[in-house]
Image (cartoon, rainbow, N blue to C red):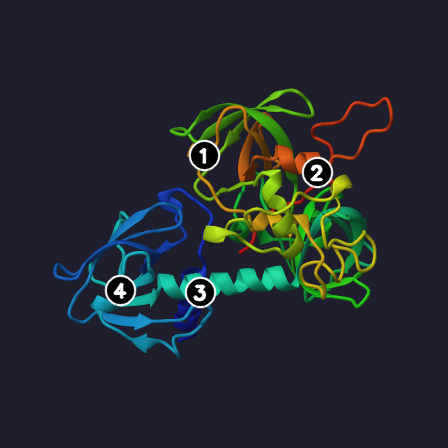
């Protein structure tokens, strides 16, 4: 009985997960001897057939019988206690299912499913949206600038238009810590980690509560990774292979940006549309930035933003705080999304990726096109006699947008 309960709990954990690390079909962890978990790709109620695709890419054919039980479960449930009975007609393409039953030796089919446990696409989307909203409301994003192994304290800086702010994050045994692996691009792929794996220069996103003065942050969850943030001019785009060639603005070297399905591509608006978005964080038609706004004040200070330090845009006035401060990272996450087809030669892009094996090839986590406006706003004003740096402000102390949201 204990073994059965453990198997059910493990299956529900995989069912609730929206991503499992890619593996070869022979070692696909979503396929066991007693069932398979994946997204419904096709369904034929008349023929009593389902086809599911696991997160690792394996396709499994599911044969249904008159004795197959159908249950709907809400995301996050860890037992079948609250499962609701449904029928085959309640199962839809895009739903996530756990097909229980003996799996064939080649792991390509379940010849006679005993149960189909369903988490609907709509329920999963609703849960993800709620999680993202909580991370925006109670989250913080920045770059690790110091570590204290004896007290497990992390010091980060995060940037707003008004300047950088330093925040101390004490980690306890109750803090859930996860970390991006090299060349990984999804928040959900981050693996369990420890304090000892952290490095100065890492990007960090945490969920928790700020102190009243905004200088400390008590974390419930911490996600970190070693990322590269690069600005460059697009020299070529190959939509078929998902590759974008750029010339790095800082080092003047050629780089290849690999765009995979889960990469988030966004478009930065022209300077003439920036004012309203920075003042109120509002959106224009279709969820995009407001139209007809005024450009930001000179010197890069956004209207409504406060200087760095306590109460600055990264403190209580920023997202998760109690004010109307403006935060760059929050703004980037609200930009309208685009596809690789919208990127053209000559565009200036800003791209974030994990530190991979080949330094000349970056697998994009986040990419922002039209970034010349943003870089111009963030670049420090040169002293008299100095030339401006077109990539100014990028890197460990600049924009932190490698770690996405759930």
Q: Are marks 1 and 4 in contact (CB under 8 Å)?
A: no
Which numbered mark, 2 or 3, is in the foreground of this view? Answer: 2
Residue 390: give x, y in percent of width and height: 70, 28
Q: 150 above or below 369? A: below
Residue at 66% in and 41% down? 226
- Closer to the chain start, of discs 2 and 4, is 4
Residue 184: give x, y in percent of width and height: 54, 42
Depth check: give the residue in front, 122 or 67: 122
Query: Is any part of residue 179 visible from this angle?
Result: no
Tell me the number on the disc at residue 91: 4
Q: Are marks 3 and 4 in contact (CB under 8 Å)?
A: no
Identify the residue at the far left of this view: 46
Q: Which residue is mark 3?
A: 126
Mark 4 surroundings: few (<14), some (14-19) or many (≥20) residues within 10 A: many
In whole angstroms, how far apart are the C-alphas of marks 1 and 4? 35 Å
Query: Is any part of residue 98 visible from this angle?
Result: yes
In whole angstroms, how far apart are the C-alphas of marks 3 and 4? 17 Å
Instruction: Name the secondary structure under disc 3.
Output: helix
Mark 2 surroundings: few (<14), some (14-19) or many (≥20) residues within 10 A: many
Residue 71: give x, y in percent of width and height: 30, 72
Instruction: Name the secondary structure under disc 4.
Output: loop
In whole angstroms, how far apart are the C-alphas of marks 1 and 2? 23 Å
Q: Which residue is mark 2?
A: 377
Q: Name the quadrant containing residue 385.
A: top right
Depth check: give the residue in front, 175 or 286: 286
- Closer to the chain start, of discs 2 and 3, is 3
Q: Which residue is mark 1?
A: 342
Instruction: Name the secondary structure under disc 2.
Output: helix
Depth check: give the residue in front, 291 or 281: 291
- Closer to the chain start, of discs 3 and 4, is 4
């Amino acid at each position: 009985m204990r073994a059965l309960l453990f198997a059910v709990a493990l299956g529900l954990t995989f069912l609730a997960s929206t991503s499992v690390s890619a593996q070869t079909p022979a070692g696909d962890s979503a396929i066991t001897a007693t069932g398979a978990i994946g997204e419904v790709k096709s369904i034929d109620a008349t023929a009593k057939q389902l086809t599911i695709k696991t997160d690792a890419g394996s396709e499994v054919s599911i044969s249904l019988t008159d004795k197959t039980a159908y249950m709907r479960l809400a995301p996050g449930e860890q037992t079948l206690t609250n499962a609701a009975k449904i029928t085959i007609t309640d199962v839809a393409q895009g739903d996530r299912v756990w097909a229980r039953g003996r799996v064939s030796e080649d792991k390509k089919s379940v010849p006679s499913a005993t149960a189909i446990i369903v988490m609907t696409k709509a329920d999963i989307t609703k849960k993800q949206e709620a999680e993202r909203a909580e991370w925006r409301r109670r989250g913080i994003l920045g770059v690790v600038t110091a570590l204290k192994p004896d007290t497990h304290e992390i010091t980060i800086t995060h940037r707003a238009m008004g300047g950088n702010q330093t925040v101390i994050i004490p980690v306890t045994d109750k803090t859930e810590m996860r970390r991006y692996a090299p060349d990984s691009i999804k928040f959900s792929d981050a693996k369990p980690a420890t304090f000892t794996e952290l490095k100065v220069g890492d990007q960090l996103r945490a969920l928790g509560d700020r102190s009243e003065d905004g200088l400390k942050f008590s974390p419930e969850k911490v996600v970190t990774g070693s990322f590269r943030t690069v600005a460059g001019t697009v020299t070529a785009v190959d939509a078929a292979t998902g590759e974008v060639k750029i010339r790095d603005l800082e080092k003047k070297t050629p780089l290849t940006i690999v765009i995979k399905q889960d990469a988030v591509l966004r478009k930065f608006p022209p300077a003439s549309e920036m004012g309203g978005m920075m003042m109120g964080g509002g959106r224009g038609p279709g969820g995009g930035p407001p139209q007809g706004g005024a450009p930001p004040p000179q010197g890069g200070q956004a209207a409504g933003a406060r200087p760095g330090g306590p109460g600055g845009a990264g403190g209580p006035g920023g997202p998760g705080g109690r004010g109307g401060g403006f935060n760059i990272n929050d703004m980037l996450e609200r930009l309208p999304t685009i596809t690789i087809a919208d990127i053209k030669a000559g565009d200036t892009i800003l791209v974030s990726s994990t530190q991979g094996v080949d330094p000349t090839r970056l697998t994009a986590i986040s990419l922002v096109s039209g970034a010349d406006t943003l870089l111009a706003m963030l670049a420090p004003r040169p002293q008299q006699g100095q030339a401006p740096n077109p990539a100014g402000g990028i890197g460990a102390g600049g924009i932190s947008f490698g770690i996405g949201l759930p």
